[in-house]
Amino acid sequence: MTKILLTGATGSMGRAIRPLLGEIAEEVVVSGRREITDLAPHETFRLAELHDAASLKAAMQGCDAVIHLGGYSVEGPFAPIMEANILGLYNLYEAARANGQPRILFASSNHVVGFHPQSEVIDASAMPRPDSLYGVSKVFGEALARFYFEKFGQETAILRIGSCFDEPTDHRMLSTWLSYRDFVAFCRAAFTVPVLGCPIVYGCSANDRSFWDNRAANYLGWQPQDNAEAWAAQVEAAIPNPDPQDPLHLYQGGKFTALPIDEDDDNA
Ligand code: 15L
């Protein structure tokens, strides 16, 4: 592994994982919509906008792998979701096709399957049950990744990320939490396994309360090290009696399942 392109480097997850990427790459091209100036010696910056295909093609030049965190990462109005997660993802895959098909880590989301109940354990064969327009856009992203794999052999690790934050802060996150170091270990596994293919993997640490079964991805050799259970007492003390009827606790997607459609004036 030599040179990785990181999209969405200015987002919260991008900022958190940047210091760890030197462990898996000699060179990291950090890209985003705003200039980044606090570069480590192994980092270079490229301004790249997902709606600007040429900027993505240029940023990807010479890269062996892509960690695609860029995009619209929460529920919101349809127009910006569409621009970043639908048009933007198409631009990303076309940039990859023009640049020798580096492997892609596609940051999909648990919100693709958010309407599955928390009482069920699901695996990669579960039916998509998106819980938001954002989740629907990630279903598109997964389909696009699969299409480029079938048609061109483009390899992608589709990671349905749970909750990638410093630490779990509510009961749901005791199931869905993904630590930064487990995420980076996943990238390493996806970029070094001899044959990647186009697997769907749930992005969570080795949580006792996980909703997800990743056994189909054992061939990647990814062994997450962290477990949200270490924060269980802290979370249970802070939120002693979670309401079981609260959407946060009914469905895997939590509160996203209860959000209203955010009407976008431009599309009304
Ligand atoms: C996501 O997909 C979001 O990007 C993140 O902000 C969290 O809401 C996360 O899911 C989650 O479900 O906790």
Image (cartoon, rainbow, N blue to C red):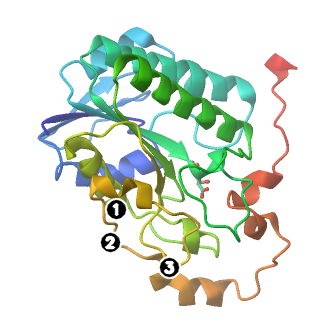
Percent position (x, y) of residue 174? Answer: 56, 74
Say whether residue 231 is left or right of residue 247.
left
Indicate the secondary structure of the residue bearing disc 3. Answer: loop
Indicate the secondary structure of the residue bearing disc 1. Answer: helix
Percent position (x, y) of residue 16? Answer: 37, 54
Residue at the disc numbered 2: 225
Quadrant of the image containing the C terminus: top right
Residue at (68, 36) in percent of width and height: 136
In three-dimensional space, the C-alpha distance between marks 2 and 1, rounded to whole angstroms, equals: 6 Å
Residue at the disc numbered 1: 182
Q: Residues within 10 Å of mark 3 (few under 14, many from 20)?
A: few
Indicate the secondary structure of the residue bearing disc 2. Answer: loop
- What amino acid type is highlighted by mark number 2? Gln
* Nearer-the-camera pick, 108 or 44: 108
Residue at the disc numbered 3: 208
Where 254 falls versus 141 (above or below)? below
Percent position (x, y) of residue 111? Answer: 64, 48
Say if residue 56 shows up in the picture.
Answer: no
The image quadrant that residue 86 belongs to is top right
Is the CB–ligand 1 distance for label 2 below 8 Å?
A: no
Say whether residue 100 is left or right of residue 73.
left
The image quadrant that residue 14 belongs to is top left
Residue at (67, 44) in percent of width and height: 128
